[in-house]
Amino acid sequence: MSSRAPILLSGICLLIWGWQHEILWLAIPMALVSEVSPLIKTRFDISRNELNLVFDMCAVFFAGLLVYGLVSASGSRAIFLLIFWLPIVLFPMLLVQRYSSQWQKIPFTAISLKARKAKQEDKSIDISFLYIGAILLSASSSQITPIFFYLCLCCVFFVAIWKLRGRYFPKWAFIACFPLAAGGGYIIDTGIIQTQLYLEEHLGRLFLDWFTKDNDPFSRDTRLGSIGSLKGSGRIIYRLETIGNYPPPKLIRDGSFDLLIGNDWSASEIVFSRAKTNNMLDWRLTTKNAQNPASALVKISGYFDDNAILVAPIGTQSMSNIPAEKLEHTRLGTIKASEIPEMLVYIAEYSVNGEYSYPPKSHDLQIPDHYTNYLEDITSTLKLEQHSPESKLIELQRFFLHNFSYTLDLDTTDTRLPPIIDFLTNTKSGHCEYFASATVLMLRKLGIPARYATGFSIQEYDDFEQAWIARKYHAHAWALAYIDGRWVNVDNTPPDWVVEDKEEGVLLGIYNALSWARYAYNKWRMGNQEIVPDSYIYTIAAILAVFIGYRIRKRRLQKTAPPTTAVNKSADFSNPWIQFFKTVEMHTVERREHETLFDWYNQCSTTLDEKSAVQLREIIRAYYRWRFDPGVDKNGLRKHIGELVDNF
């Protein structure tokens, strides 16, 4: 059993990789270079220092890709970037093993700095199977043709395992068991996919809540009734820049909800309408209202998933500079974009006086039955029945400002009451979700249609960036009220919540600098899209290859036959013969570590013609005499062995 991969296997895997990623133009040359080595007699005499240099440069290239991935991508995108480049990063290592005269196995000292420091010269490894594993891992990251890839994967595994199987494992048993294993793997893979589809279809929102709670446009989990600290981090989520003379919007929304179910808010309608566009870049959500010509522009930038919910001020009428497959929105104001870049810098045009589209429906006045009596008692004390809607908003704001306080550290509540009622009657202290939920219910009790909205509060200006910053701890909830034919923001959370959430310190300053650097770099990339970033990586890889080639260009090219010059130059006479035997191994049978030369000869002679087998036996006999016979004429025998090698 040999640890070396079968001939052509790595080349075939490279072609599969190229097919999967649609880069056959690169995979075909790599496959040819890796597989023609047995046909080319030229070998490079690479020193140990040069071997270490090749592997160190591969490590540097991989580290550079890691930094590039962290800067230009995030999450799974960075991981897939590294996986995609694995065959290219490791390719020089394979070439060293295929084209060097003495490194048919790679010593651990070249791979591991720890082994290099400990000088573990006796340990080495054949990296051909490791490289094939890296190719298949990279190919699996692109499921363009999943069935084709799985069939190819099965074929590769069959050839590889056939090569590695035990000598005493019956061939018929292996051939019989492998289809069962391949079929079982396909059934398991298909079963996982079907199970996922079933869960998505039948568990719907529960499945979505479990995996993407923060991005669900149809429901929003609250922390009503939760105990403990809910303070968020200082991570920058969005940046806003004003355009024109209008100040920035105080609130930017990512969702609105009109149904209170338990302690969570949900949307009664989940139907998206497609926004109108002529160029797949600029999108019209609603028509301008003739009664409200005043509109403002704000530039919003942030990082998003491929399919993401976008934030925008209430009353947004159009959005521009969004390269998307489609842009959709609901009657509640949720905006969703599909197939968008990781970073967006888009412009939202919005009405400064509120949202005139989509009048209220019955859900906007609905109050759960178990809240009705409590709300009746609370609102009756305010005596607002005869007030105008605008006056009701003002009095309600005063009610919360003078009687309630803001906190993120929640104490134990009276579990016998709904959390919102307990907040209104007992604790009178809570975070924005309490104030928003209570405001919505009280407005509805007063006859004003209202909704629950979530998003971010815009309150921090960065002088260095000259932009408004929305951090994670600026996440906010508030109410929407329908007044005079338009929806307006109603935020009754006490203003001191800004001070409560603010973080200061050296670490935040360092984070701000790093966040700005990443933002500036990605913004520069967006402005220079005619330069494909991947072209930089190909260029760097080519430069590294040229540099490594330059370092070894003065090294002697050694022919696999005859190695006579090596014999005459070598002061250590045994080394050239070891190299000669290794060269023969490459074309016959690999010699095991425990085998003597004659044991190895008994196996490899069957692969040689009769004349070559006799010559090889004579070379081994002469070599043994030269090494172990103290009475032999060393110089004469050395000349004789050289003649035998020349003839061979």
Image: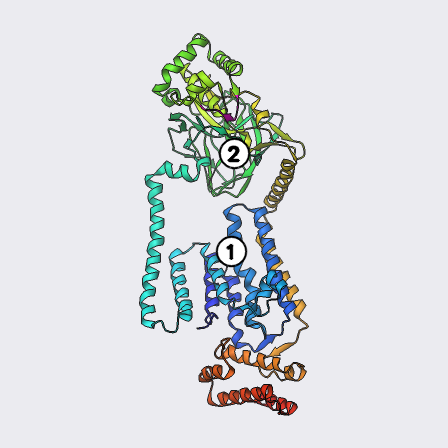
Q: Residue at the spot x=36%, y=45% of the render?
A: 196
The C terminus sits in image quarter = bottom right
State the residue position of label 2: 319
Label 2 to label 1: alpha-carbon separation? 34 Å
Instruction: Note whether residue 532 is visible.
Output: no
Decide if residue 387 is on the left or right side of residue 637. left
- The type of residue carrying mark 2 is Met
Q: Label 1: few (<14), some or many (≥20) within 10 Å?
A: many
Q: Let me know if residue 407 is in the magenta part.
A: yes
Above or below residue 25? Residue 219 is: above
In depth, the one of 119 and 536 nearer the eye is: 119
Mark 2 and mark 1 lie on one chain; the one further toward the N terminus is: 1
Tell me residue 461's x, y (percent): 63, 30
Task: Point out the stretch of residues depicted in magenta.
Answer: 406-412
Tell me residue 451's x, y (percent): 43, 23
State the residue position of label 1: 84
The N terminus sits in image quarter = bottom left
Tell me residue 199's x, y (percent): 34, 42
Decide if residue 337 is on the left or right side of residue 235. left
Q: Residue at the spot x=61%, y=79% of the render?
A: 575
Above or below residue 426? Residue 572 is: below
